Image: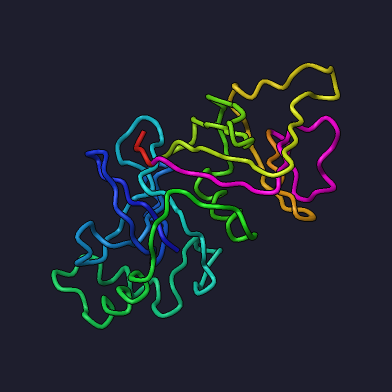
Amino acid sequence: MHALVYLQNGSYYTSAVYGYYKGPATIRKGYERYWIVWNSSKTRLIRWPAMVPDKEYLVPQILIVDSDQSNWIIDDDNDSGCVDFLTIELLISILDNNVQPEDILKKCRNADAPYIFHDKMEIKKQKDIEDLDWISMGFHDAFLTKKEFLEDGSLYLALDGIWCCELEIWFSGEIECHTATGKNGEEYDLYWDWQIATILMHEGFIYFVVDEPVTTFADIKSDCCYFKARHLKYRITPRLL
């Protein structure tokens, strides 16, 4: 698992994520989760609040861009988890140490070193869909700011409203747009905030379904708003709200 860690000056850096846990019950609701990541100079591990502290509204300050937790041990009962070569108790115990154990830091560096963040990605497998779902946080509150067909025949969408980033999407190959509802025949307004959006793959096509709770291709009905194409690429522009 890897993330963009946002700093208050508007910059960010990439880091592997080694664990997460909830703080004391006295912490304000919505601000309980902490992630364990590198500091910006990658010299020590730190706890990083999921939300900017002491804000009236929730402002995320970490963006998961690689959701792979295949080597994690998850404790759902305590809402915590960490990489399988460490324990969450061990990680928490060293966070405030002036000098952190070099053997642990070495293991963490090895996990972090191979990763390269690419702001432009293509959906090729289910893991890519899962990554984009983490990045967009399920597309909740997303809305369209631009929709146009480009000279090369691809369809371009620009989205805003997503926490932590702006998102651009390119569809190409046998594109279909279904944006009218079957309920009243009116054009679906993609420029309003969405509650959810879902990406599915089926028989060589990628479906981007807007504002409908679908989990499989069979759930896509005639009155759904969706885009369909052979290929989907996307680019994120990080930003702190």
Residue 132 inside the magenta-drawn segment: no
Question: Against 93, is 190 above or below?
Answer: above
Q: Residue at x 78, y 51 (%)?
A: 216
Q: Residue at x 85, y 48 (%)?
A: 218
Q: Does residue 155 appear left or right of residue 58 in this picture?
A: right
Q: Within the image, what quadrant is residue 166 found in?
A: top left
Q: Residue at x 26, y 65 (%)?
A: 45
Residue 223 screen position, x and y as percent: 83, 30
Query: 158 or 229, which lies in front?
Result: 229
Residue stretch rendered in magenta on the structure: 211-237
Which quarter of the image is occupied by the N terminus?
bottom left
Q: Residue at x 13, y 69 (%)?
A: 98
Question: Against 16, is 164 above or below?
Answer: above
Q: Does residue 155 appear left or right of residue 174 in this picture?
A: left
Residue 192 screen position, x and y as percent: 60, 22
Q: Residue furthest bottom?
A: 103
- Color theme of the render: rainbow
Residue 226 inside the magenta-drawn segment: yes
